[in-house]
């Protein structure tokens, strides 16, 4: 850093030609990932944790154990995915040049752009829904589209100075979130009905759901860890911050859903009906913009893998406008299916990355240049891990996709047992096949 430049003024480079500053410490990253672990979508998604199969609800103890196990497994994956970003200084999709080659990295890059646009739209949708709930509790009627546009403007503004946004989260937002979560926990413990009944039968699908919540961040982990001062800080910030926050978020969501009879349409009612609910829920709604911010910023970084010399601010503004328009028309009914598809794509890809980078000595030869040669054999374990996910796991409510995979299972004469985990199964298959590939072809 040049003499006379104030540390707080250090910002992310505008193109991939510039080296990233090592500006984020453990507290910065812990605050970032802790805030990402608290999501309004996580509150409403608690019903999918408690009853992932729709007809075999878990007991409260089983749901909480699933939340802890799934969060630890998922965040460990995200944390490991963050380490190569710190060591190479490359964004997530550029990092994949070392795994697949420059040209082949375009495939996961396009998939990541699609999923991040979807995530960004979902986040603007939930911000608008939360804001409407607060306004409605005060008798105001503000159109949904107005809230979406306002959230889109805030989101896009944060992406212009992303490191400044991370520091803002650490200094101010995190404290407000902790206070708000503590307040609602106190309120719900006294009001929620006793949670009894249920079983452990759907434990594995519940763990898969929580892993999917966590692992959805794998494709963007390096976009922020590239600014980390150390690999230890990057890994610790992810695992420590995100695990605690996500478990707390899901527990609070279970309490909220219990108060409204698992009616997701009324999930915000317990929050805004509390005596100071509008104030504290407003903090959580405003904080949700960090979710949309990281998705739009990661989309920008992914696009820069395709267009490395285009100013990221131009891409961010264009992406922010597109996501805002998408959010106006998005359907939240596809949320659970969306999570399942994300996990099926990126869990096995992450397994291939981890084995090649950490186990097979890839760290010493990782090529993230624009001329990195294609490595077609690495697509094989990724694809087979993807297939394994759908053979073992619950299928999303998409008629043609569900029908096709049920036909494949029938053809194979295979029916997954309740204890089987799609996430862990696809990870193991992809990892073992990567290990078995001939070395000269890797």
Image (cartoon, rainbow, N blue to C red):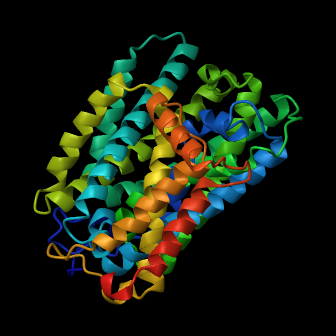
Image location of residue 171, percent across then percent down = 48, 57
Q: Quadrant of residue 383?
A: bottom left
Determine whether, in the image, residue 137 is placed left or right of residue 398.
Answer: right
Q: Is residue 353 left or right of residue 415?
A: left
Answer with left or right where residue 429 lies relative to residue 47: left
Residue pictured at 44% horizontal, 45% vertical = 291
Residue 330: quarter of image: top left
Count the marks: how many?
0
At which x and y percent is residue 312? 18, 55
Give the quadrant of the C terminus: bottom left
| On screen, residue 62 above or below 351 | above
In the picture, measured across the screen, residue 8 lies left or right of residue 315, that is right
> Looking at the image, which residue sits at the far left?
309
Q: Quadrant of the N terminus?
A: bottom left
At x 44% / y 57%, what residue is drawn? 346
The x, y position of residue 113, in whole percent, is 29, 48
Q: Nearer the viewer, residue 64 or 170?
A: 64
């Amino acid at each position: 850093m040049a003499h006379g430049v104030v540390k707080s003024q250090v910002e992310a480079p505008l193109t991939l030609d510039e080296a990233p500053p090592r500006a984020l410490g453990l507290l910065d990253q812990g605050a970032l990932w802790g805030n990402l672990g608290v999501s309004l979508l996580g509150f409403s998604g608690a019903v999918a944790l408690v009853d992932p199969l729709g007809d075999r609800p878990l007991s409260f103890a089983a749901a909480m154990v699933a939340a802890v196990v799934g969060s630890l497994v998922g965040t460990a994956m995200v944390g490991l995915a963050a380490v190569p970003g710190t060591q190479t200084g490359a964004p997530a999709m550029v990092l994949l040049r070392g795994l697949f080659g420059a040209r082949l990295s375009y495939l996961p890059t396009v998939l990541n752009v699609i999923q991040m646009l979807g995530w960004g739209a979902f986040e603007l949708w939930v911000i608008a829904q939360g804001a409407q709930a607060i306004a409605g509790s005060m008798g105001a009627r503000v159109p949904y589209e107005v809230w979406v546009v306002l959230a889109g403007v805030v989101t896009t503004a944060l992406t212009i100075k992303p490191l400044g946004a991370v520091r803002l989260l650490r200094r101010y937002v995190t404290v407000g979130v902790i206070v708000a979560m503590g307040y609602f926990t106190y309120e719900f413990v006294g009001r929620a009905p006793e949670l009894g009944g249920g079983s452990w039968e759907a434990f594995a699908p519940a763990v898969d759901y929580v892993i999917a919540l966590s692992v959805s961040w794998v494709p963007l982990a390096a976009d922020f860890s590239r600014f980390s001062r150390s690999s230890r800080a990057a890994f610790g910030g992810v695992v420590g911050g995100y695990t605690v926050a996500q478990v707390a978020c899901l527990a609070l969501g279970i309490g909220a859903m219990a108060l409204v009879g698992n009616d997701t349409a009324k999930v915000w009612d317990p929050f805004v009906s509390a005596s100071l609910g509008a104030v504290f829920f407003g903090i959580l709604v405003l904080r949700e913009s960090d979710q949309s911010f990281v998705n739009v910023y990661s989309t920008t970084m992914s696009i820069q893998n395709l267009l490395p010399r285009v100013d990221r601010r131009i891409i961010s503004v264009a992406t922010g406008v597109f996501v805002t328009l998408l959010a106006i028309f998005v359907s939240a009914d596809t949320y659970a299916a969306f999570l399942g598809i994300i996990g099926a794509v990126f869990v096995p890809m992450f397994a291939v990355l981890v084995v090649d980078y950490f186990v097979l000595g890839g760290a010493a030869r990782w090529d993230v240049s624009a001329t990195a040669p294609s490595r077609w054999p690495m697509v094989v374990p990724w694809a087979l891990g993807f297939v394994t996910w759908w053979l073992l796991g619950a299928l999303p409510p998409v008629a043609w996709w569900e029908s096709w995979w049920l036909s494949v299972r029938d053809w194979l004469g295979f029916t997954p047992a309740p204890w089987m985990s799609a996430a862990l199964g696809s990870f193991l298959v992809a990892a073992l096949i990567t290990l078995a590939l001939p070395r000269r072809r890797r």
